[in-house]
Amino acid sequence: MFAIRSIAVLLLVLAARPVMAAPAPAAAKPKADPAVAVLLDQLGYRYEIDEDGDYKMTMSVDDDRRTQLVFVRSPVESYGRYRVREIWSPAYRSPTAAFPGPVANRLLEASHDLKLGAWVKQGGHALMVVKIDADADAEALEDAITAAVTSADEMEKELAGDPGSDEL
């Protein structure tokens, strides 16, 4: 009887011990798409690769008095037979998670008038997003970058009401 109780107590003690799990492997850092680097190098753009593996550039606008951030995303999205790459340029940061009504309405109106790209909300930020064929050439990528940067800078000036401010 004593042996059965001893075994039962031992099993309870072992069951109550914290189980030491093996540490989770570190998440792999996203890799930059080398095809983007080839195109940006052809265009003579200076860039850095951010923590998401995207190409980040600071572009001069408005006769070099202002700058605008732009990201050429490395991931390629697919829909059916379409493969799409995105170019992002931020223009607005909301003081709250939700955009004020007039800002949201203005972004929707502006999206209607755009020939290339659209306004999207990501967290508390408004981003100009231009989507192009993932296999686009350097000229098409340059057009998309220019469209994103120009539209984002114009909207930033309009919403900020401060022509000298380019901080988000």
Image (spheres, helix red, strand yellow):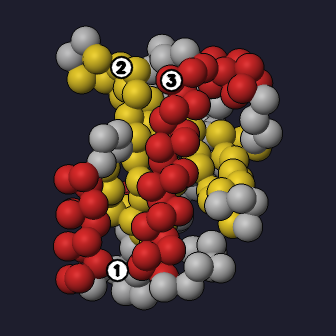
Specify the amino acid type for callout 3: Ala
Across and down, in percent, residue 6 comes to 46, 63
Q: Is residue 101 left or right of residue 145?
A: left
Q: Which residue is mark 2?
A: 83
SS of the residue under disc 3: helix
Can residue 12 be seen at all in this image of the molecule?
Answer: no
Look at the image and tell me in which quarter the C terminus lies: bottom right
**Real-space CA distance between mark 3 and mark 2, rounded to the nearest whole angstrom:** 15 Å
**Figure quadrant of the N terminus:** bottom left
Sequence-earlier tag: 3 or 1: 1
Q: Amino acid at mark 2?
A: Arg
Q: Nearer the viewer, mark 3 or mark 1?
A: 3
Q: Residue at x 63, y 72 (%)?
A: 166
Amino acid type for the residue under numbered disc 1: Ala
Q: Earlier in the sequence, mark 3 or mark 2?
A: 2
The residue at the point 32 percent across, 57 percent down is 120
Q: From mark 2 to mark 1, how far is it between C-alphas? A: 31 Å
Between the C-alphas of marks 3 and 1, the distance is: 34 Å
Q: Looking at the image, which is closer to me, 51 or 71?
A: 71
Q: Nearer the viewer, mark 3 or mark 2?
A: 3
For image coordinates 66% across by 57% down, the residue present is: 61
Residue 70 appears anywhere in the view? yes
Name above or below for residue 114 compared with residue 72: below
Q: Position of residue 64 (x, y in %)?
A: 75, 60
Name which of mark 2 and mark 1 comes first in the sequence: 2
Q: Nearer the viewer, residue 55 or 12?
A: 55
Residue identifier under label 3: 140
